[in-house]
């Protein structure tokens, strides 16, 4: 190797070493070994609340019964709560990403920028984590009283970003089709009834299209809202004179009643006995509250 080539090689190696040292200083002296952040036993049964604080406000998930939860006073959805406790199951495994507090802003893990997640049991915080930015399926976390930042593979990154409405229970009604015995509709001031008779359905005395009735009732197996009104929209909602009403009677005599109030973009719907207002798209409401002619058997004298 010529002296010139050797000199170039030495310079190149020096640049690489300098770059590595600089990166280590920026990261605060990290390593590639897997570390474990131990967590206490966190389950729905022993947890009173989980609070997420961030710049946009607080999200407070509170247990109000054996298996019921609220989010900022609203009923919370079961699936979201299950995801959250699954994310807390066991220890968090990852790599040390930084130790220097001056690098915290790089990971959005400073006290002001991070999402702070606290888990309370018997009025005491048993877990306290700061959640920083996400990178793929990983998220940066640290404990508030420590400088070390860890990169872990956890759903906590996305869960800590959820808004209040993302946690709310969107189930408006859930009825098994075989349990429904009667279906009453008021639409555009016109009323009709759909009743089960032995193995057949009758629409105001005419034979019903069994397939059409099946498709209709299947929509009530798990009817979920597309959203909720904000404070200003809530003021204008009025269910005292609903534009559409449906009543579903199940075997045994109990009824579920839904009332609909239209908006420029769709409908608000409320279940009788529940003060919650839900949003549904207009095309969906038209399917949920169909015209009687769409349910009459085609070979019926009153059908098309």
Image: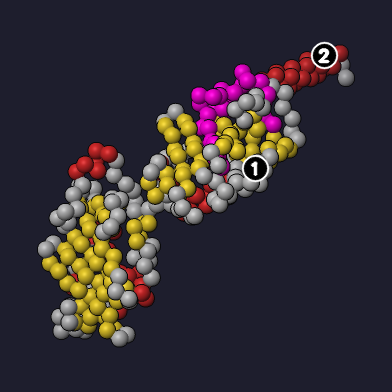
Is residue 62 in view?
Answer: yes
Image mark for residue 14:
none
Does 169 appear above or below 23? below
Where residue 38 appears, x then y in whole percent? 68, 40
Reading the image, the residue beneath label 2 is 7
The question of residue 180 being in magenta is answered with no
Name the secondary structure under disc 2.
helix
Reading the image, the residue beneath label 1 is 40
Does 214 appear above or below 244? below
Quadrant, the C terminus: bottom left
Q: Residue at x 57, y 36 (%)?
A: 125
Q: Residue at x 88, y 19 (%)?
A: 1
The residues bearing labels 1 and 2 have C-alpha atoms spaced at a distance of 57 Å
Name the secondary structure under disc 1.
loop
Q: Is residue 231 left or right of residue 79?
A: left
Does 10 appear above or below 190? above
Is residue 283 in view?
Answer: no
Could you say which is closer to the camera, residue 163 or residue 20?
Answer: 163
Q: Residue at x 41, y 31 (%)?
A: 56
Per the rendered image, the range of residues in magenta is 96-121
Dot 1 alpha-carbon crowd within 10 angstroms: few under 14, some 14 to 19, many 20 or more: few
Does 42 appear above or below 26? below
Where residue 95 appears, x then y in whole percent? 69, 35
Where residue 26 appears, x then y in whole percent? 66, 20
The colouring scheme, among rainbow, by chain, secondary structure or one colour, is: secondary structure
The question of residue 113 being in magenta is answered with yes
Q: Is residue 5 left or right of residue 91?
A: right
Circles 1, 2 touching at the beta carbon (< 8 Å): no
Could you say which is closer to the camera, residue 82 or residue 155?
Answer: 82
Task: State the residue lying farthest toward the bottom.
Answer: 198
């Amino acid at each position: 190797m010529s002296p010139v080539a050797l000199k170039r090689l030495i310079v190149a190696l020096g640049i690489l070493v300098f770059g590595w040292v600089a990166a280590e200083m920026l990261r605060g002296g990290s390593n590639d070994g897997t570390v474990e952040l131990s967590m206490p036993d966190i389950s729905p049964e022993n947890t009173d609340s989980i609070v997420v604080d961030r710049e946009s406000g607080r999200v407070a998930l509170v247990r109000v019964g054996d298996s019921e939860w609220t989010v900022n006073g609203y009923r919370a959805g079961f699936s979201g709560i299950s995801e959250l406790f699954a994310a807390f199951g066991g220890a968090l495994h990852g790599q040390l990403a930084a130790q220097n507090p001056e690098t915290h802003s790089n990971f959005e893990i400073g006290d002001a920028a991070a999402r702070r997640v606290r888990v309370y049991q018997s009025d005491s915080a048993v877990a306290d984590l700061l959640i920083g930015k996400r990178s793929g399926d990983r998220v940066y976390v640290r404990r508030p009283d420590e400088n070390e930042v860890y990169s872990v593979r956890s759903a906590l990154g996305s869960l800590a970003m959820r808004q209040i409405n993302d946690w709310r229970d969107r189930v408006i009604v859930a009825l098994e089709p075989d349990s429904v015995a009667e279906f009453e509709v008021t639409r555009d001031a016109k009323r009709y009834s759909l009743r089960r008779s032995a193995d057949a359905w009758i629409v105001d005395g005419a034979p019903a299209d069994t397939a059409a009735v099946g498709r209709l009732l299947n929509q009530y197996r798990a009817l979920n809202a597309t959203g909720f009104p904000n404070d200003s929209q809530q003021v204008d909602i009025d269910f005292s004179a609903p534009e559409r009403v449906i009543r579903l009677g199940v075997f045994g005599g109990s009824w579920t009643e839904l009332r609909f109030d239209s908006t420029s973009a769709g409908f608000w719907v409320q279940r009788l006995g529940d003060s919650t207002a839900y949003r549904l798209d207009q095309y969906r409401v038209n399917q949920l509250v169909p015209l009687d002619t769409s349910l009459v058997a085609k070979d019926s004298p009153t059908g098309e």
